[in-house]
Image (tube, rainbow, N blue to C red):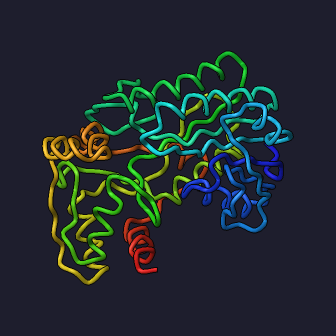
Amino acid sequence: MDTQGLHVVVGAGGVTGRLVVGHLLAAGCRVRALTRDGRAVGSPAAELRAVDASDPVALTEAAEGAVALHHCAMPPIGRWLSDFPPLTDSIIDAASATGARVVYADDTWMYGRVSGPMTPELPSRPVGRLGVLRAWLAERLSHAAAAGRIRLSIVRAGELYGPHVRSMIAGTVFGNVHRGRAARWFGDPDLPITPTYVDDFARTIAAVGQHDGESGRIWHVPHPRPTTGRELIALAAAQAGHRARVTATTRWQLRALGAVLPLAREGAELIYQFEQPFIVDGSATTEVFGLTATPYAEGVRAVLASHSG
């Protein structure tokens, strides 16, 4: 693939998309950053374009001449069921029309309950409607690739953390620690976990978009050795100069909160991930692309600094 060619980033205004834009530019690529309103994405060298990516005609026009179409769009979780399917179909149509490789920023929810490390070879056995949706979206893209309509790379991350990230281990853990409060951990804080630093996710997406020579392959983001929620909180507390305190929230407590808070209902559906070892194996990505993971100490330091800004 021509690394100096045009890379189009859908969802360039989001946390991951902005970082992908930066990594592609740093590698010498031309980048067209797509958002609904054409907003700045933190990289002045990027070409900004206001596009509704769910409109296949508009997206095809914006992707003309691209070597890769990076699917980093992330609708609000309450609109996933309504927004993600037409968005994904539009991306398939645009990639089919232009010949651009689709690089899909995915998660691990489709794997469901597992008994060991998550590898790209695992079958999809999703838990809950959001996991089913993510499995269906990935399958839709994979079927288009198998039919020869598109060239496809799927990049999967575990539970994200990092500056400005919203996730089940974001504000309730690092935000609370920064303020000297007890960190709230969903599930069991003593089980092994490999949280994904968001910049590692973005670096992997950018590298795969430039250098993946296959089609239909799934790549997992590289991670450090497993840690636990309690160890991660202790690390954050030590860096913040506070005493480490942990409050564990169970599935039943989340369900009770879900009676009044919609986001708690979504969390109750996903908490199974934190009731089992949550280890993402990205060793194949390291071997092929030479990517390494950001140490937890460095990632946590960046998160805490973002809360201070």
Which image quadrant for residue 183? bottom left
> Please, which residue is most extreme toward the front here?
260
Q: Looking at the image, which residue is at 40% across and 46% down?
A: 158
* Residue 190: % across, % down: 17, 54
Question: Would you say 74 lies left or right of 65 here?
Answer: left
Nearer to us in this view, 203 or 78? 78
Question: What is the tally of numbered marks visible in this picture?
Answer: 0
> Please, which residue is most extreme toward the top here?
147
Quadrant containing the N terminus is top right
Question: Would you say 154 lies left or right of 258 here?
Answer: right
Q: Looking at the image, which residue is at 53% across and 23% down?
A: 139
Q: Is residue 279 above or below residue 302?
A: above
Which image quadrant for residue 251? top left
Q: Is residue 275 above or below residue 160?
A: above
* Residue 180: % across, % down: 23, 78
Nearer to us in this view, 227 or 251? 251
* Residue 276: % across, % down: 22, 40
Q: Is residue 232 above or below residue 181?
A: above
Nearer to us in this view, 196 or 115? 196
* Residue 94: % across, % down: 75, 31
Question: Would you say 172 lies left or right of 25 here?
Answer: left
Q: Looking at the image, which residue is at 25% across and 67% down?
A: 233
Q: Is residue 182 above or below residue 136?
A: below
Q: Looking at the image, which residue is at 57% across and 36% down?
A: 154
> Please, which residue is most extreme toward the bottom here?
241
